Amino acid sequence: MQVFLIKRTLGFLTTILAISVIVFLVMNVLPGDPSVTILGIDSSEDARAALRAQLGLDDPIWQRYLHWIWGVAQGDFGTSYFFRVPVGELIAERLPLTLSLAAFGTLATVVLGIVLGVIAAANHGRAGDWIIMLLSQLGIAIPAFWLSMLLVLLFAVKLRWLPPGGFPGWDEPVAALRSLILPTTALALVQSAVLARVTRSSALEVMRLDFVRTARATGMTRGRILGRHILPNALVPIVTIVGMQVAAVVTGTIVIENVFYLPGLGRLVFQSISNRDLFTVQALVVLFAAIVVTANFLVDIAYVLIDPRLKGRLS
Amino acid sequence: MIEAENISVAFGEAEALRRVSLSLRPGERLGLVGESGSGKSMLGLALMGMLPEAAQMTGRLAIDGHDLSRATDNEWRDMRARKVAMIFQEPMMALNPLRRVGDTVMEPLRLHLGLSKSDARRRALELFEETGIQEPEEKLRQYPHELSGGQRQRVLIALALACDPGILIADEPTTALDAHVALRITDLLTRLARDRGMVLVFISHDLAAVARTVETVAVMYGGEIVEKGPVAQVLSDPRHPYTKGLLHARPTITGGELRKRLPMIPGNVPALADLPHGCRFSGRCSVELPQCAEVRPALLGIGGLRACACHHVPEVVE
């Protein structure tokens, strides 16, 4: 177990470092000059040159990278060119909203996907199965941003049940939750459609195994066999997909937060890229990558918790 | 106690079982032998109400006086584990791999008998001891993949016996096991049936295992019982041409030397839909009469406790 943890931690750090290098390179290769962002298009070339020198933008790229990553290692993500505040503060302000949205999105995906998938598998070849598979096919085919707009048109504009966008802050919990319902739905519907299909096919595969017959022979009800015997055995592929979907949901917040005007990290990423706000973008991409890598790590732990036969993987 | 009268199981036009009758009293041990596709496993599943969804069953079936000819799935569920239990061929995957085997055995105890967790545990331990599992305390906590094939089959037997059923159906329980392990399992089944006064239906194509385990044997071919009687008599003095062929096809050591080539029954078991209308064995039989393919021979008493379904073997009325 300890060996496993050490290995995983090293793997985690290597991945994050690799990502930081790639992000840094990409952001520096992209056209656009931060000094223009800061001083405005009307600024003089002299002023810009002075600022570039002050910010160290004229240093060789490897020097700038080392300077930046050394700061990151000490918890200093640099100062945003655009907002003129430490990037750490920017992120801390917006993190709760994005984390809530991602958590709700993942939760809704898992619940909806597994429930629908199990219902489809239990009704294999019958109407319920067909309907769920048809809807999930539709769900997979719909882009999340378009679905978001449809949801806004129906539930916010026409029915006026829910706000079309914006976020009042967690000081008003009810209003905050209400404003997250549509974004969560938009995030989760597409992902749960994928998960429902995986759950269904995994459950159908397990249903054919001998121990299901044993459970039937010992007088178990269909529901009990499904919930206690089939589903746990179908979980390994489901958990694998959920791990990948955490990544999809986290990156999905970028689009969703922009559609719904939610002041979270996704919106910050978008603004920062437009503004060539190098430090902010770099920090955010590294943060998103860390979330995804952590999700994969949790998936590996989950495998072992689900299946005692995989205990060997821990050493 | 099982009373089955003219049980037929059909998949559309194809008949997997044709007019099979059985009557088994407590403590009786019956062997069902035959090739794959002879219907022996189908009969076992019919006695559990676990036939495939597409199957149509007709005839009269009663277990312990409950008429189950038209039983719903719920009625069958109440019979399983409590009245009739079954163990299967492949012990490798017959246990839920994610559960400790103790929890698997405790599940029906808690669910059907309403035992508390500690009572169920105590009972599971007794069952493990009764089925000859070594170090039962420790085994309760183990997962199926940590047990050997023989141990798993013992766990499955313990599971089947959990709710004290009057009938145990064992479908090829030893086929996947090593010969010496198989021997111990059949001996265990014999002892359990005797000690508990339980009906044992032992399905196998292994004639030696059947001879050790049961008192009565029914030879099946093409979904029918073609010959039936005390196991020693049927195996030493077969009357039906199919039984003769089956016994002849066994590897035996004569004069200290293994016969080089095994005699075979000519042809293959036909597909269900292609079975002849009359005697199911016609077409492969070496002593076939003109009427065999058209007229179904009834299973008739031929003296003592024996019965045979063949136009060649005359009925004996005592």
Image (cartoon, coloured by chain):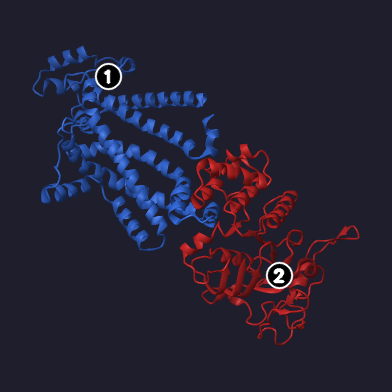
Image hue for chain A: blue
Q: Residue furthest right?
A: B255
| Kind of residue indicated by mark 1 | Phe
Q: Which mark is residue A77?
A: 1
Instruction: State the SS at label 1.
Output: loop
Is A248 located above or below residue A274 in the figure? below
Decide if residue B31 is on the left or right side of residue A282.
right
Instruction: State the SS at label 2.
Output: strand
- Residue B144 visible within the image: no
- Quadrant where the C terminus of chain B sits is bottom right
Q: Position of residue B118 (x, y in %)?
A: 53, 40
Image hue for chain B: red
Q: Position of residue A35 (x, y in %)?
A: 17, 20
Q: Which mark is residue B219?
A: 2
User: Disc 2: which chain?
Assistant: B
User: Disc 1: which chain?
Assistant: A
